[in-house]
């Protein structure tokens, strides 16, 4: 059948959480001439309402789809994030940062941490943290989007509900039609593609491409099209969370805190006007009541919402794109939020879809490519998260004992062995976690290499020392010149409206 090149492709986005509105907004702003987009969501069901810490890739994504940083930050009461502080992970009462910054200066042959290891072997060098501007700025509560001529690498903490509302307003203004109602029925055409969804009020929304953003339940891709879910609970034990918001009692820090507990961990995400908190835990090792009291016992301010329980299964949809249905967001898979990667996965899925969009109808090859890339990306992040749990000296509870003795993916075993024996680290296959990310987490959790590259010995000892001292002084100077995080926010993106 000939394709009508003048007709717009009818796209139905099912679900209006972060995934749904971000997808609708991106499609309408960049492909709106070619697409007729309807978003269906149900106020009765609501969205998951968490997902407030991000990683730096969000800035590139926002630029690509035309979201203005200051406008977005004001509308979502956002703060800046320079990394994550991990407390009690390597062992109880210790702490390290996984910052977004570059550490020191690498050469083409060797990474900076290898020069630093040589310095330590020669008795100088201080802490590796001293060589990262973003890390030192985080510790000092300082922030600016750039330091002198050097850009600062940062992400955001944002209010998830306000973010969806912000995107909705922009999407509707750009032409997305929003339909309120609960999808109760889904119909296929004669070749098994989805043809329409019917709502509880009896109305029907027809389409050619369906994006499933219905959250964990995956109404279209899972319940209707029966695409299986690959369960990764044997690799990542957490299956529950409790979230609660508190009043801010101190000025917002430019980083997330991830505090490990006896059977999981707790997040603290500072916004301009409140703090998001939550505990992630495994119900096999901790009861809901214990989790709740651990969470409430570790808050820094009075609660402003009731604690809310969320259950989840870690894993991935075996095919995120099947027939004419593409799952984006929680419907396509979920990894717990330890490295704040879910919104990132939404954005990469959207970009991938825009590159592979089936303008001429359904395409098996496009879908296969989409699915391969999605799988690789998710497995890479999974391995990085497992690293945090497995690489620990903690042995103080059945939860940590389980992780220490569990079988981990071969790729991760190999990576840890290479680092332990040779200090060698490399970026992952999807270039999400850089060398510095792997190094900070591996060393932060106590894995110190036995030997390292000789590049640091090519320089005379004095040369290495003076270069490192110059670098450290430059960073100290730059950090001292940065404004306080709270002051920068006040001048750059003060919250537009209080909740
Ligand atoms: C505990 C926890 C902490 C998290 N923390 C982070 C974090 O720090 N950083 C991060 O990046 N991500 C985080 N995430 C993930 C993040 O919350 C999600 O990726 C993000 O919110 C996207 O969710 P979603 O839009 O896919 O689903 P939801 O928010 O669940 O939205 C689903 C939508 O589908 C609609 N819907 C469902 N069924 C129907 C129906 N029958 N008819 C009509 N509409 C329907 C609902 O109304 C809703 O609009 C976290 C997740 C959890 C569980």
Image: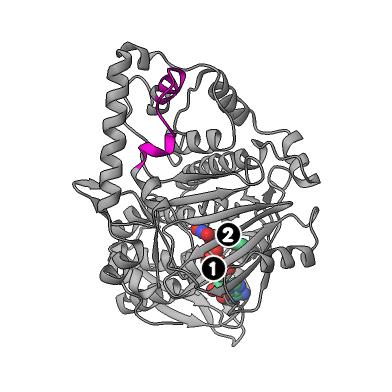
Give the total of numbered labels: 2
Please indicate, yes or no, whether residue 328 appears anywhere in the rendered image: no
Disc on the earlier residue, 2 or 1: 2
For the question of whether residue 177 can be seen, the reply is yes
- Name the residue carrying label 2: 267
61 left or right of 222? Answer: left
List x then y, in percent, for residue 442: 55, 34
Residue 296 pos. (x, y %):
67, 69
* Residue at 40%, 13% in the rendered image: 454
The residue at which mark 1 appears reads as 276
Q: Residue at x 59, y 88 (%)?
A: 201
Q: Which residues are magenta?
A: 116-132
In depth, the one of 296 and 9 nearer the eye is 296
Q: Position of residue 124 (x, y in %)?
A: 41, 24
Q: Residue at x 47, y 42 (%)?
A: 369
| Beta carbon of the mark 2 residue lies under 8 A of ligand 1 | yes
Mark 2 and mark 1: Cα distance apart in space = 8 Å
């Amino acid at each position: 059948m000939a394709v009508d090149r003048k007709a717009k492709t009818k796209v139905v986005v099912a679900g209006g959480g972060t995934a749904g509105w971000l997808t609708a907004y991106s499609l309408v702003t960049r492909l709106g001439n070619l697409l007729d987009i309807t978003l269906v969501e149900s106020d009765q069901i609501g969205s998951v309402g968490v997902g407030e810490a991000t990683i730096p890739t969000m800035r590139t994504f926002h630029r690509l789809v035309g979201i203005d940083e200051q406008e977005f930050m004001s509308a979502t009461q956002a703060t800046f994030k320079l990394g994550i502080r991990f407390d009690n992970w390597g062992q109880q009462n210790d702490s390290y940062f996984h910052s977004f910054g570059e550490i020191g200066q690498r050469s083409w042959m060797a990474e900076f941490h290898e020069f630093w290891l040589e310095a330590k072997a020669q008795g100088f060098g201080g802490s590796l943290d001293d060589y990262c501007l973003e890390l030192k700025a985080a510790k000092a509560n300082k922030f600016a989007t750039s330091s002198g001529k050097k850009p600062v690498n940062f992400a955001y903490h944002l209010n998830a509900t306000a973010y969806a509302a912000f995107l909705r307003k922009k999407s509707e203004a750009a032409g997305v039609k929003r339909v309120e109602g609960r999808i109760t029925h889904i119909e296929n055409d004669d070749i098994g593609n989805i043809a329409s969804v019917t709502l509880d009020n009896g109305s029907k929304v027809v389409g050619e491409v369906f994006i499933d953003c219905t959250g964990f339940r995956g109404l279209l891709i899972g319940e209707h099209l029966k695409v299986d879910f690959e369960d990764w609970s044997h690799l990542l034990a957490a299956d529950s969370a409790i979230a609660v918001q508190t009043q801010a009692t101190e000025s917002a820090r430019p980083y997330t805190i991830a505090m490990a507990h006896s059977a999981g961990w707790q997040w603290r995400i500072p916004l301009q006007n409140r703090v998001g908190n939550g505990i992630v835990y495994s119900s096999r090792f901790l009861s809901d009541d214990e989790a709740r009291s651990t969470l409430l016992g570790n808050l820094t301010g009075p609660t402003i919402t009731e604690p809310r329980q969320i259950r989840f299964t870690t894993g991935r949809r075996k095919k995120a794109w099947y027939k004419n249905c593409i799952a984006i967001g929680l419907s396509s898979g979920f990894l717990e939020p330890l490295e704040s990667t879910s919104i990132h996965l939404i954005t990469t899925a959207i970009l991938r879809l825009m590159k592979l969009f089936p303008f001429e109808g359904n395409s098996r090859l496009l879908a296969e490519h989409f699915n391969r890339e999605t799988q690789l990306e998710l497995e890479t992040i999974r391995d990085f998260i497992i690293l945090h749990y497995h690489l620990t000296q903690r042995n103080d509870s059945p939860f940590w004992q389980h992780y220490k003795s569990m079988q981990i993916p071969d790729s991760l075993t190999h990576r840890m062995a290479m680092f332990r024996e040779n200090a060698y680290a490399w970026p992952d296959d999807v270039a999400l976690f850089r060398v510095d990310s792997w190094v900070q987490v591996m060393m932060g959790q106590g894995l110190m290499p036995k030997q390292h590259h000789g590049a640091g010995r090519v320089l005379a000892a004095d040369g290495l020392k003076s270069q490192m001292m110059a670098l450290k002084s430059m960073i100290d100077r730059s950090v001292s010149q940065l404004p306080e995080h709270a002051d920068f926010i006040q001048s750059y993106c003060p919250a537009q409206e209080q909740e």
